[in-house]
Image: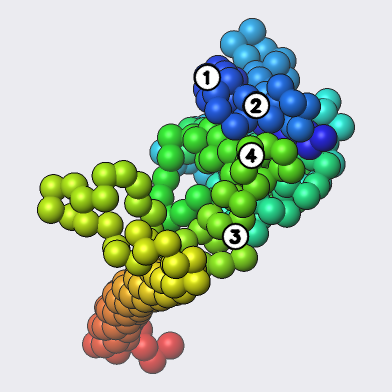
């Protein structure tokens, strides 16, 4: 059985989703044990505070390291211990497969502006992100990972082939799917899917999978190129600003030297 620990300041966030669909069935079947831990149980002040102002100043609050360390230690958790963070590597299907094949998984959910960096460096074994966007907390990301992992556990799905033909399962993007009616509002199901020729249907699905995968890859490359271009523009702007500051400093130095020479102080 896989054990999944979720450390959060909002345990109630998980109550409803974990009681539904595949996660609920997998828990009932004894395939997974999801332990949701309230981080505030590991605070030691009357207000149960988990955050504090950042050293060095700045906006927002930072989640403190001690409650995270104490929560994980109370669980006796073993690796992987995953900090959900926008700094992390992007979560992928390969990660879900790796976690599903393990014995235990611990997910650390942040909130507020940031988490003390010592949690990332000394407690977590890895950092993961869902993508290049910011959520109000790590809870939605944790829930997505739990769902992605649990559905891969043997016996979690009634139809194992359904999972094995999903996108990213030893393949790229899966082919489009259709069901009744065969025609709707002028849009018809591809004729090959109605042909009954299983070889042709398999070939069509393979071709569509390849087409959609290549389209996705092209979109990803374009997005990366745009991101790289923004980074180059930002670096150029920084370099220009630094050059302007250096030139201004040089002009001040020259003016000072000229003033010194004019007043006779330059002769020593």
Q: Residue at x 38, y 74 (%)?
A: 211
Q: Residues within 10 Å of mark 3 (few under 14, many from 20)?
A: some
In this picture, is 260 found above or below 227? Answer: below
Residue that badge 1 annotates: 16
Q: Is residue 234 visible?
A: no
* Marked residue nearer the N-terminal end (4 or 1): 1
* Residue 57 in picture, x, y percent from top left: 48, 40
Q: Residue at x 73, y 54 (%)?
A: 98
- Are the residues tagged 3 and 4 within 8 Å (C-beta)? no
Q: CA distance from mark 3 to mark 1?
A: 28 Å
Residue 122 horizontal/vertical position (percent): 76, 47
Which residue is labeled 2 in the image?
Answer: 25
Q: Which residue is mark 3?
A: 169
- Between discs 4 and 2, the one toward the N terminus: 2
Distance CA(mark 3)–CA(mark 4): 15 Å
Q: Which residue: 67% across, 37% down?
A: 156
Residue 26 placement, left or right of 238: right
Going from the N terminus, do you reach mark 2 or mark 1 first?
1
Residue lying at the far top in this picture: please name it.
46
Kindly identify which residue carries mark 4: 157
Disc nearest the viewer among 2 and 1? 2
96 or 21, which lies in front? Answer: 21
246 lies above or below 55: below
Secondary element under disc 4, as helix, strand or loop, is: loop
């Amino acid at each position: 059985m896989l054990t999944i620990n979720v450390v959060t300041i909002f345990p109630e966030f998980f109550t409803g989703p974990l009681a539904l669909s595949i996660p609920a069935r997998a828990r009932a079947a004894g395939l997974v044990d999801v332990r949701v831990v309230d981080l505030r149980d590991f605070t030691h002040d009357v207000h149960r505070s988990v955050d504090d102002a950042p050293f060095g100043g700045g906006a927002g609050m930072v989640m403190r390291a001690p409650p995270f360390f104490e929560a994980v230690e109370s669980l006796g958790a073993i690796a992987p211990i995953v900090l959900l963070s926008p700094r992390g590597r992007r979560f992928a299907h390969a990660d879900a497969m790796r976690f599903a094949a393990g014995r235990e998984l611990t997910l650390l959910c942040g909130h507020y502006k940031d988490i003390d960096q010592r949690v990332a460096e000394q407690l977590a074994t890895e950092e993961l992100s869902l993508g290049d966007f910011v959520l109000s907390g790590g809870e939605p990301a944790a829930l997505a990972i739990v769902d992605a992992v649990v559905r891969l556990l043997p016996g979690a799905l009634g139809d194992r082939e359904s999972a094995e033909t999903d996108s990213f399962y030893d393949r790229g993007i899966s082919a489009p799917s259709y069901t009744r009616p065969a025609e709707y509002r002028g849009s018809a199901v591809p004729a090959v899917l109605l042909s009954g020729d299983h070889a042709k249907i398999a070939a069509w699905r393979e071709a569509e999978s390849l087409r959609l995968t290549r389209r996705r890859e092209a979109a990803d490359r374009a997005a990366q190129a745009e991101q790289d271009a923004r980074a180059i523009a930002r670096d150029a702007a920084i370099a220009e600003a630094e050059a302007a500051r250096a030139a201004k400093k040089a002009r001040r130095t020259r003016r000072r030297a000229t003033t010194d020479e004019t007043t006779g102080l330059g002769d020593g």
